[in-house]
Each structure stands twice: as structure tokens, then as C-alpha cells.
Image (cartoon, rainbow, N blue to C red):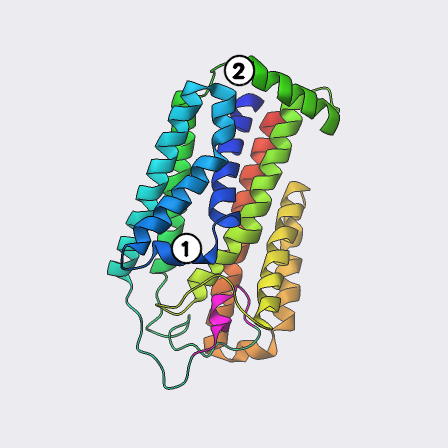
Amino acid sequence: MSHSAILLIALAILAHLVADFVLQTDAIAEAKSAPDDRAWRGLAIHAAIVAICLLPFVAAYGVRGLGYLVIVALAHGLIDRSKVVLHRRAVRPAPKPAAPAPEAAAVAEPAGPPSAPDAPGDRAWTSLPAALFLADQAAHFVVLIVGASILLRDQPTLSAWNDVVNAAGARVLPVADLGAAVAMVVVVLDLLIVNIRGGFFLVGILLAPRGSASGSAPGPERVGATIGILERLIVCVLVLAGQAAAIGFVIAAKTLARFRQLDDRHFAEYYLVGTLASVTLALSTSIVAAAAITAALA
């Protein structure tokens, strides 16, 4: 695959990641899941954000780029709505405990043994929300990649766009092969957003009790989330540097810090689910990114 095709796909994915994980606020996410008319307003706002992030494709490809924008934005709204409906049908909130459960279960790495009644280790826990999250993202990626391959791949970009990009690129990245350098930068940006923001939400959703909101968490639980992010970034760096064998030392050091708490079976299962999900995401995305960078520079 040429670096131009890799750049096209990487840019499409970057637009999606920015719309979904950077610009989408908690209020928009909550509105999309609302049982009333707020859901459609939330979806409309989010689809508009997706469309805004895809405007560079209109500037680069003209009418074809506009068609790509419309298709992706509409498909994005439909996919998100489908996920909300499936989530309601598949997952029902667990009975509330006598005392409010702490929100520590909503972060990637808990500060201590989880006390939520249906976190990993309890029969009431389910991985369906995380599975729906992954299916939702996979569906978005399919639309992005297939749409770009059909409408935009091998199509010439507008001369005005080329002039602007070449002038700006020559100043920011003064290299011989500008296209390959830009492709590498965009792929790395994709990798960072996936593992910082995407991984935070994925592991948080996987560990959260049924019916609870995932995402941001207050107080000291933020420390656990930060540990998870740093863990994924270290894995990414090791894979890109060709030192994947050293990942075992990262996991071993982290496990050693939790050694005494692993005697608690409930916490051990909670810890293993979060750690394995976090490392798997970082490892798999880093392998894909490394392959894309190698192909772009070839």
C-alpha cells in the first residue's frame, strides 16, 4: 500500500478519533443515551461534529469529499443510535446496593479492591457494554475505510489544496519525502488518541458496574486511570522501538506493586481484566501502527 493510501486512511481515522474522543463532551454522550428527544439532539450534535472534522476532505477532494462527509456523518449517527438501542436491550442496571457504590470501578486501574456489586469477580458483571463499544468502533472504521477506498483513493486532490499543504508542510516538516513523513505523524497521532482516550473509555466501560456511567472519575481514582494510560504508552513505545519483549517487565513491575492485594480473588480478577484489556489494546494498535509506518516509509 502506498504512503498516499496510508495517509488517506490514517487521516480519516484521525478525524473520527478527534470527533469521538476529543471533541465529544460528557454532556453529548449522556444526551445520546437519553430515553427521550434529547437522544436525537445529542446524535445530531455529534454527527455535526463528525462532519466538521471531515471538512478537510471537502477542501482536498471537492464534490467527492463532500459526498464522503455526508455518508460518514449519517452512518456515524445511525451506528451510534444502534449501539444505544442494543445497550438498553442487552444490559439492565443491577439492583442498587444499600450504600452508594464508589465510582472507582469506572477507571482503568483501581486504587484498591473494588467494592462495586457487579464488577469483575461477581456473577452480575457483564462484558457486553465493552463488546458493544468495540463493535461500534469497528463499524465506524469499516465505513471510514470502505468509503475512502471507493470515493477518494487514487483521486487527484485540488491544486489549491496541494499548494497550501506543500507550503505548510515544507516549513513544519522539511524532509525530502513530505507525504511519507506526514503519514507517519498522522499514524502516531492516531495511536496516541486510541491509547490515551480510547483505552481509558474501553477499560473503564469494561470494569464499570452495569448501568453506571463510565468515563471521568473524581479524586484519587484518577491515579489509577493515569497508570493505565502510562502503561499503554510504554507498550506502544516498546513495540515501535522493536523491543516488544520488554513488555513483560512492565507488567511484572505493575503486578509486584499490587502483589499483596492479589490474594483477594475479587480484586485479582478485576485487576487482570483491566490489565489484559489495556495491554491487548496497546499491543494490537502498536503492531498495526508499526506496519503502517513501515509501509509508508518503504
| Element under disc 1 | helix
Q: CA distance from mark 2 to mark 1?
A: 36 Å
What residue did someone put label 2 on?
158
The x, y position of residue 94, in whole percent, is 31, 73
Q: Amino acid at mark 1?
A: Ala
Crowd class of label 1 (few under 14; some 14 to 19; many from 20; radius 10 Å): some
- The residue carrying mark 1 is 29
- Residue 44 coordinates in the image, percent (x, y): 36, 44
- Is residue 192 shown in magenta? no
In this rendering, is residue 271 above or below 52?
below
Residue at the image position 47 percent from the left and 70 percent from the top: 105
Q: Badge 2: how crowded within 10 Å, few (<14), some, or many (20+)? A: few
Q: Amino acid at mark 2?
A: Leu
In which image quadrant can residue 279 be found?
bottom right
Outermost residue on the left side: it is: 89
Q: Residue at x 39, y 78 (%)?
A: 117
| Image side of residue 252 versus residue 22, left or right | right
- The boundaries of the magenta stretch are 101-110
Identify the residue at image location x=48%, y=61%: 215
Q: Please tell me whether mark 2 sits on a helix, a strand or a loop.
A: loop
Inspect this view and state whether residue 135 appears: no
Give the prevailing secondary structure in the magenta stretch.
loop
- Please state if 18 lies on the left or on the right of 242 as rendered: left
Position of 62 with respect to 183 (left or right) is left
Instruction: Kindly identify the residue that appears in the image at 53 percent across and 27 percent down.
Output: 6
Whole-percent x, y for residue 26 in the image: 46, 58
Dot 2 or dot 1, earlier in sequence: 1
